[in-house]
Amino acid sequence: MSGVLRYLSHPQVAIESDIPVPQWKLSEIGKHRVMRIAGAPVLRATTRIVSSGETKAIETARIMALEIGLDVEIDHAMGENDRSATGFLPPAEFQEIANRFFSEPHISVRGWERAIDAQIRIVQATIPYLKAAGQGDILLVGHGGVGTLLYCHFADAPISRSFDQPNNGGGNYFTIAIDSFRAMHPWRRMEELLESKPCNLEESREHDARWYGDNQ
C-alpha cells in the first residue's frame, strides 16, 4: 500500500487576547490530547513531520516528533489564514466573520486574507511534500481554517464551511493518498488515530458516511 499524508490541526490553545494569535500556545488540555495520541501505532510509519510556523502548531508537532523519533521541519507557508487585520475577536464575532470567509472566498472580509488566496497558498505548500514522498507517511501539522481549504481542494469540493472541522477545540485530522493526491476522508477527531488502521478509500467512505450530519 502506498503511503499517506495526514494533516493534523492543533488542539486547544491558551487564549491570550493581548498576544498575537500566531504566538498562542497550547493549553494544558491541548498538550494532554497530543501526548495521548502521539504513540498511536498507525503513526509509526511516519517518516517526515512538517509544521506551520505558528507556536501552537510547532508545539503539537514537537510532541509528536519526540514520540515518533523525528525532527520537525518548519514551513511558514502553512500558517493559518491571515487575520491580523482584526486580531483577537470575541467568539460570536469571530464565528460571523469566519462564516463569511468561507461563503465569500473571493472577498477580503474585514481585511482577512481571502479564502481563495489562503487555499492556493496551502495547496502550493503541500504539493511538494506529496511529490517528494518516498517510503512511509507524512504528517503536516497546522490549522483548521487552511486545513479545511486544503481538504476541499483534494476532495475536489467547493470552498464551504460545511467541510470545516467539528467545533471541538481543534485536534482533528484528514488523510490524503500520496499515490492519487485524493482526500481519503474528511476531518476526524485525533483520538481516532489510536484505533486507526491503514485503510483504502472505500473503507474510509464507509467509516465517514455519518460525518457531515454530525458536523452541521
Image (cartoon, rainbow, N blue to C red):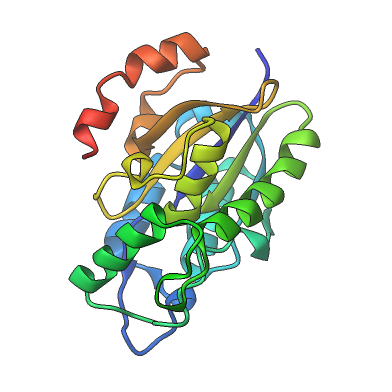
Q: Is residue 214 shown above or below 202?
A: below
Residue 202 lies, with reference to residue 61, above or below; the image says above
Say if residue 135 shows up in the picture. yes
Query: At 43% across and 11% down in the image, what residue appears?
Result: 203
Q: Position of residue 80 (x, y in %)?
A: 51, 63
Query: Going 34% across and 66% down the picture, which residue do you hit?
Result: 13
Q: Quadrant of residue 15?
A: bottom left
Q: Where is the N terminus found, in terms of image quarters?
A: top right
73 sits to left or right of 31: right
74 and 177: which one is in front? 177
Residue that extends furthest to the bottom in the rendered view of this protein = 18
Image quadrant holding the C terminus, namely top left
Q: Is residue 43 left or right of residue 170?
A: right
Q: Residue 170 appears at what percent x and percent y?
A: 34, 52
- Disc tally is 0
Q: Is residue 109 above or below residue 183?
A: below
- Describe residue 77's horizontal placement relative to residue 131 as left or right: left
Given the current orientation, which residue lies at the most extreme top position?
202
Name the spot of residue 36 as percent of width and height, x first.
36, 44
User: Who's the residue at 52% across and 64% down the image?
Assistant: 114
Q: Is residue 70 in sight in this rendering?
A: no
Give the vertical position of 118 relative to 18 (above or below): above
* Residue 44 screen position, x and y as percent: 57, 30
Residue situated in front as seen by the camera: 107 or 7: 107
Question: Residue placed at 23% from the left, 73% from the top?
Answer: 93
